[in-house]
Image (cartoon, rainbow, N blue to C red):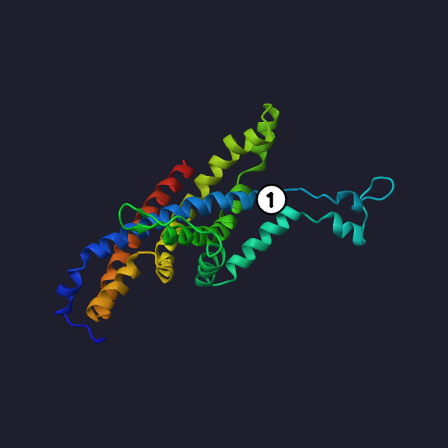
Amino acid sequence: MNSFIQLSNFPIVFKYWKLFLQGTLVTILLALCTVVIGFVLALLLALMRMSDIRPFRRLGLDKEGHMKEDGAGLAVSKFNPLSFLATAYVEILRSTPVIVQVFIIYYGVFGLIKLPAFTMFGFIKFDRFFPGVVALGMNSGAYLCEIIRSGIQSVDGGQTEAARSLGMSSGQNFRYIILPQAIKNILPAIANEFVVIIKESAITYTIGVQDIMSAVNAVKGATFIITEPLLVATAIYFCLCFPTSKLIAHFERRMSRGDKR
């Protein structure tokens, strides 16, 4: 296997252009599905972290109903199980490698849960693609959780008071007042997460997802050429990520101008 770059090898690599095209489509679809799953999961986690559900609240009160100044009861009364679970999830997922998470989901979870083996669009293996989406979506949700939480907290609290004065419920206030403004504030960060996922999705080829790196591996096995397929993959990732990053920056500037008016 020759590791030196030879221009004569590129025509050989380009004969497998269909594999790279299919890999590019899989990568884009993988990133889109991951962002959707990650956003829904992150929104749920953010709400859990911001919740004020304390089942042992009474332990922090004295006999007269006043808040205790110290003691074990006061500490226990502040325990929020939803916030604890969400925080633990976020910290664990953010502190472990993505490849470990992918292997645990694929071999550990879906090794027990048998998925139907069929192909989507004629070349995407569902039983490989779906575990990859789940693993990346869970990882993305841990990062997006903090982004969404900061976006919600960035909305002026006076708007909540105004919504209450108009007779809006907490759910209506969150749906029509808080969430739209929060999404507007964090939209560039969510779009940047999409770019990150495009690059991180390369790890899923280790479980058989037919992405760009899977095409590189297939070409390497068929031609014993490695450097040139990697350069082609690099160019494809660049063509996906660089224009997307510039487009995000463009919309971010336009949104910033709108805020200054």
Is 83 rendered above or below residue 163? below
Horizontally, is 101 left or right of 118 in the view? right
User: Crowding near pointer 1: few (<14 within 10 Å), some, many (20+)?
Assistant: some
Residue placed at 66% from the left, 48% from the top?
A: 81
**Left or right of residue 25, residue 48 in this image:** right
Q: Looking at the picture, does residue 114 appear above or below residue 100?
A: above
Tell me: 222 left or right of 81. Answer: left
Residue type at tag 1: Met
Q: Residue at x 44, y 45 (%)?
A: 37
Q: Position of residue 18 (x, y in %)?
A: 20, 54
User: Quadrant of residue 10 in the image?
Assistant: bottom left
Q: Secondary structure at mark 1?
A: helix
The quarter of the rendered structure image containing the C terminus is top left
Quarter where residue 212 is shown: bottom left
Residue at numbered disc 1: 50
Residue at 75%, 43% (x, y): give it.
57
Which residue is farthest top?
A: 166
Residue 113, percent across and down? 47, 52
Say if 7 sits above or below 193 in the image.
below
Can you tell which quarter of the image residue 165 is in? top right
Q: Nearer the viewer, residue 90 or 61?
A: 90
